[in-house]
Image (cartoon, helix red, strand yellow):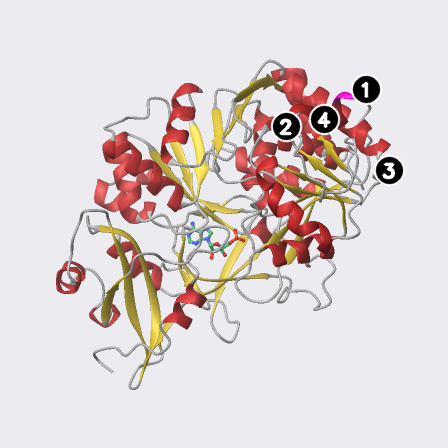
Amino acid sequence: MLGLMMNMPLMISNLIKHADAYHGDAEIVSRLPEGGIHRYTYHDAHRRSRQLANALNGLGVKMGDRIGTLAWNTHRHFEIYFGVSGIGAVCHTINPRLFPEQIAYIINHAEDDYIFFDITFTALIEALVPHCPHIKGWVALCGHGHLPKSDKIPNLMAYDDLVNSHSDIYEWPEFDENTASSLCYTSGTTGNPKGVLYSHRSTLLHAYAAALPDGLNLSARDSVLPVVPMFHVNAWGLPYSVALTGAKFVMPGAGLDGASLYELFEQEKVTLSAGVPTIWLGLLQHLQANKLRLSTVRTLVIGGSAAPPAMIRTFDEQYGITVLHAWGMTEMSPLGTANTFKLKHLGLSAADRDKIRVKQGRPLYGVQMKIVDGEGKSLPHDGKAFGDLLVRGPWITRSYFKSTDGSPLVDSWFPTGDVATIDEDGYMQITDRSKDVIKSGGEWISSIDIENLAVAHPAVMEAAVIGVVHPKWDERPLLLIIKKKDMNVTREEMLEFMSGKIAKWWMPDDVVFVDSLPHTATGKLLKTKLREDFQNYKLPTA
Ligand code: AMP
């Protein structure tokens, strides 16, 4: 027997409709790449999304067509999220930090029809044009006055002209909630990028879960600033979750340095922000150097790479800000876990709570998790055993876009490529990417644990640990360090600092000081490059 409830499809357009209807005067603020601050409301954003929908129809865009964006977080990008998906087309966000060849590959693989771009990327677009012959038009995200003067970009138009020349009378269509809504390519460190194709249903379910108190805890009383770009897994789904809750939304454009962020945090009374650890490193330095405090921020969501325990403690103890450590991936929309306490943890000592806080957190309802050994056998959830982390859930990918390699799933579970422990309370802790695990004498060493310890030293700005070939142990850990400006620490002092804080056999065999460390386009340490650079490195113990 079937239930007798309405069968309404979960539609992205209903999010912006809801935000307009019940939070129509809540503000959306953007720092524009062309300069200045733009300020309007959900009511305005909804109206402009409808105008965009008419404009797209006018351009001949149909259900399922892909529309690419190369853009920062701004109100125009926000309108594209709703206008494009709302008509049943696919909003394909592209990471401008990738190499131009990778971007051209992605645009061609996705078969985008139009590209909407910020004018800061004009030179990049000019370089892409000859390699993307099927693009029907290039839309610069600006008003008429800022339209780039380029004779190398065919069918170039200004976004505001396109939108303003269309009516705002538009009824969002209803269709199957499993229809594709947006597309994001993973920036893997090897091979070609792979497309993750989200649906209206997966996006809505993710938006609900992300807003929950033990998720990101969003409400109509928040002012939310995503530092995480809208080209990186839909800014972790925040544009959808803020529309769902009616939170104020503040977008930083291209200003991601500590000073620009601080200014916007204070000016717009931001309560919650989200980004990768390197962003918060920049903000912390700005705060410390200028003796500043953040007066309204209550939560910083940190994910994308492990949040160093020292950073979590500094924000908490010196600034009274809670770090919400979260984990996920492009294939997971992206949220998998968030780290919040349970009732029974509230009475714990600060030291015991610290031990929990450094973990990546508990699964949001909807995400199932397990860890397995090399043979695929499930490992116990005891916080000690570590193995390959597998996940399932309605906002987790089952296949890559246009993939000819078959499904990535293993017995209907998605292998994350992460190695983790899960404790009795369900808190998961990443110990490594499976490719980065250091295998010493048949045992695994967690590079993340060693990095976390190294950055707790006051003179260390950033640390990376890689496995280097060793004649006796196969591999041994090598610690690479960037020192903070005007601070000093020697190899011996570093080893002395770490000694006794991790297992003896996990201690790095050597420490090398470097000026910079390579990162991927999404801000993660590029360990493949480091392993390549140090492949002939001779450890003193070898
Ligand atoms: P991406 O698909 O680019 O978002 O990358 C996903 C990968 O980033 C995950 O599989 C993890 O390896 C890593 N990652 C994300 N969040 C965290 C975190 N909180 N701690 C450690 N690694 C993380």
Q: State yes or no: discs 1 and 3 in contact (Cβ < 8 Å).
A: no
Q: Is residue 131 visible?
A: yes
For label 3, the SS is loop
In the depicted structure, whether residue 488 falls above or below residue 472: above
Q: Secondary structure at mark 2?
A: helix
Please name the amino acid that badge 2 sits on. Answer: His
Task: Name the residue: 42% across, 51% down.
Answer: 305
User: Circle 1 sits in a helix, a strand or a loop, which is it?
Assistant: loop
Q: Nearer the viewer, residue 55 or 304?
A: 55
In percent of width and height, residue 112 lies at 75, 48
Q: Is 309 included in the stretch rendered in magenta?
A: no
Residue 191, numbered circle: none
Picture quadrant of residue 47 = top right
- Binning the other alpha carbons within 10 Å of mark 2 as few (below 14), some (14 to 19) or many (20 upward) gives few
Label located before the other in sequence (2 or 1): 2
The residue beneath circle 2 is 146
Image position of 43 with respect to 380: above or below: above
Q: Amino acid at mark 3?
A: Gly
CB of residue at label 2: within 8 Å of ligand 1?
Answer: no
Disc 3 designates what residue?
60
The part of the chain drawn in magenta is 164-168
Compared across the picture, whether 353 is left or right of 378 comes to: left
Q: Amino acid at mark 1?
A: Ser
Mark 3–mark 2 Cα distance, whole angstroms, equals: 25 Å
Instruction: Give how far apart the Cα atoms at labels 4 and 1 are.
Output: 11 Å
Q: Secondary structure at mark 4?
A: helix
Q: Earlier in the sequence, mark 2 or mark 4?
A: 4
- Binning the other alpha carbons within 10 Å of mark 3 as few (below 14), some (14 to 19) or many (20 upward) gives few
Is 285 left or right of 526, judged from the image as shown?
Answer: left
Q: Which residue is mark 4?
A: 49
Is any atom of residue 445 visible in this view?
no
In the picture, the disc for residue 167 is: 1
